[in-house]
């Protein structure tokens, strides 16, 4: 969920399992993003039909001479230490934004199943979506700098595979593909009866992944942040603090 001024074009899309929202200052760029998602999904489907291990592996998988979407997913999986499919939504969003920027867009935002890739010449507010958790869609993040990718993994409110129990693990990274894979890796570790230690473990893991800039974790009504996390805001509220905040294992 993101908020913008009224002079932007916004379109919801659905392509099989890929669904979300595209926003831009260019209507043509929005259509370019939709075409990108459809094209790269087709290429990925063809690739996995010939390489089933890529589809099912929970460990990193090497790709040689595959389509760009598969190569980027594999790269993100290697960096985060997870299977390549953990990065699929984020990479599709990154590739769509890349196409929008090439088309001349100054605002290019693609949200794909909770993962978002952002290039924008203005600030963007993105809400935290975590199912029925108390903070879900009530707080969010103000993104002042881009390009940036973010992804949220949940062990409670998501159909995606997770071995953890966090209500939400949100990762901020240099791109959405890496954020997507890292959110899975961190989310797998956040579990157990000691939420403070579980959150600290998740933050340490997240910040150890090259390219991850910030970590936000919601677990058992406790919040922990680490690294460079954008300003946390009330959704729909105006904040006087336009700067990003740097946190070190802050728990509340």
Image (tube, helix red, strand yellow):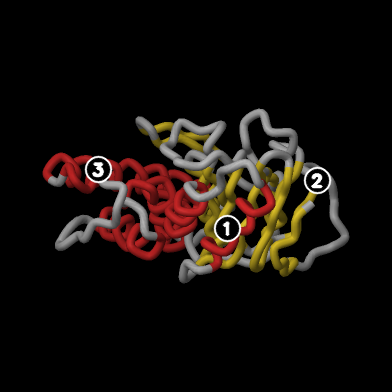
Q: Secondary structure at mark 2?
A: strand
- Tags 3 and 2 in contact by the CB under 8 Å rule? no
Would you name the residue on which mark 1 appears? 201
Name the residue located 68 percent from the left edge and 44 percent from the top edge.
127
- Residue 239 figure quarter: bottom right
129 to the left or right of 50: right
Residue projecting furthest to the left:
50
Q: Position of residue 4 (x, y in %)?
A: 69, 48
Residue 115 is left or right of residue 145, and the answer is: left
Q: Is residue 122 among what the camera can see?
A: no
Please state the horizontal and vertical placement of residue 158, each as a whole percent of the image.
51, 33
The residue to which callout 3 is attached is 55
Residue bearing mark 2: 234
> What's the CA distance linking mark 1 and mark 2?
27 Å
The quadrant the N terminus occupies is top right
- As measured in the structure, the alpha-carbon distance from the residue carrying label 3 to the one carrying label 2 is 38 Å
- Dot 1 or dot 2: first in sequence order is 1
Closer to the camera, 144 or 218?
218
Are circles 1 and 2 on residues that touch, CB within 8 Å? no
């Amino acid at each position: 969920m993101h908020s913008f001024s009224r002079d932007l074009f916004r379109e919801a899309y659905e392509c099989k399992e890929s669904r979300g929202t595209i926003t831009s200052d260019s209507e043509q760029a929005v259509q370019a993003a939709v075409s990108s998602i459809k094209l790269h999904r087709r290429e990925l489907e063809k690739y996995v039909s010939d390489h089933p291990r890529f589809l099912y592996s929970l460990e990193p998988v090497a790709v040689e001479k595959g389509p760009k979407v598969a190569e980027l997913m594999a790269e993100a999986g290697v960096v985060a230490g997870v299977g390549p499919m953990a990065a699929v939504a984020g990479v599709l969003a990154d590739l769509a934004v890349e196409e929008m920027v090439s088309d001349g867009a100054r605002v290019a935002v693609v949200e794909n199943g909770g993962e978002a890739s952002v290039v924008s010449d203005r600030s963007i507010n993105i809400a935290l979506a975590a199912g029925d958790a108390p903070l879900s869609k009530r707080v969010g993040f103000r993104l002042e700098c881009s390009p940036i990718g973010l992804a949220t993994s949940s062990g409670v409110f998501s159909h995606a595979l997770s071995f953890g129990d966090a209500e939400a693990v949100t990762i901020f990274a240099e791109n959405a593909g890496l954020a997507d894979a890292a959110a899975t890796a961190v989310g797998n570790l956040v579990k157990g009866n000691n939420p403070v230690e579980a959150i600290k473990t998740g933050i340490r893991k997240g910040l150890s992944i090259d390219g991850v800039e910030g970590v936000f974790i919601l677990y058992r009504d406790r919040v922990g942040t680490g690294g460079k996390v954008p300003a946390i805001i009330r959704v729909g509220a105006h904040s006087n603090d336009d700067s990003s905040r740097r946190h070190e294992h802050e728990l509340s």
